[in-house]
Image (cartoon, grey):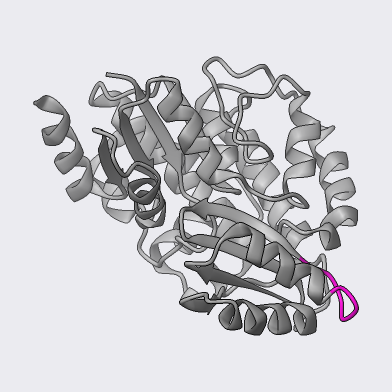
Amino acid sequence: MKTAFLFAGQGAQTPGMGKDIYEADPLAKAVFDSVELDVDIKDLCFQGPKEKLDDTQYAQPAIFVTSMALAKVLHEYGIQADVVAGLSLGEYAALCYAKAFSISDGAKIVRERGKIMANALPAGTSSMYAILMLDEVSILEACEEVKSIGVCEIANYNCPGQIVITGEKAAVDKAKDLCIEKGARRAVPLAVSGAFHSSLLNDAAIKLHDVLSNYDLKKPSIPVYHNISGNIEDQPLIDILSKQIAHSVYFEQTIANMLGDGVDTFIEVGPGKTISGFVKKCCKGHDVKILHVEDMTTLKECVEALKG
């Protein structure tokens, strides 16, 4: 068995996340208690309110800390990853799991990353849509056709049948309509505060680079598949991570590469199960286990599933 942990990204946050593992397991409690930020991370995760938890600058550290607490409990049950990846924000949890930096430093980094991304663009000027069941060529054509209106690019290659576009609102709205005309089944707006993973965040990427330069980023102890390519990279982490927020996320390619490298067990770690849905679509025709762990109930289900 070769196991991958896949860490949740922004959008998975929900009030109450992490509360039951905090109350049930001393290791999870220790993770939450160890984090010192300018926001009460336990109150934020356990109580919300949802409006605050949905704010990028708060969502990012909240999901990160919850994910790391879950990873600690998995380790306690003897479940460990051979390789890791994460969806956008989740890449930081993947790197922390791979000992590139401590949980304490990771929480501080993603708190700053969240602030940078939340304030990168004026409110209401940008948007993102998930385009369902339309090929990449047609989506790229739509992005090209709206160039005179503004920036519109591909943000995420999530899985077969789901590609996310991002950019300036007028351009993205027009591209979304063109995608429907070209045969897309649906275009789903994403509840985000900016055109993440687009060139509009190039200045934000420079600011993030400055933040990251204050931390000691170590070589990961296990293979990490990075968003910017879907591959295991040998570039400096500071360059990979600063580039990531203004660059397409190649998640579908990440899963394809993991399959090619012999991964047969995928465990989504963190709130929600969005990633599990992507993995199922990426792994059609492959004999793999796909599990998710977000609380004590799903933890026990995961342990039971892996016993056999």
The quarter of the rendered structure image containing the C terminus is top left
Is residue 8 in the magenta section?
no
Residue drawn at x 60%, y 19% is 220
Measured from the top left, where is residue 54 in percent x and y?
A: 54, 70
Measured from the top left, where is residue 123 in percent x and y?
A: 77, 80
Nearest the camera: 158 or 67? 158
Is residue 9 in view? Answer: yes
Measured from the top left, where is residue 122 in percent x and y?
A: 83, 77
Residue drawn at x 34%, y 35% is 266
On screen, 122 above or below 116? below
Is residue 150 in the magenta section?
yes
The stretch in magenta equals 147-152
On screen, 73 above or below 76? below
* Res. 211 image quadrant: top right
Nearest the camera: 146 or 189? 146
Is residue 54 in view? Answer: no
Residue drawn at x 27%, y 18% is 1
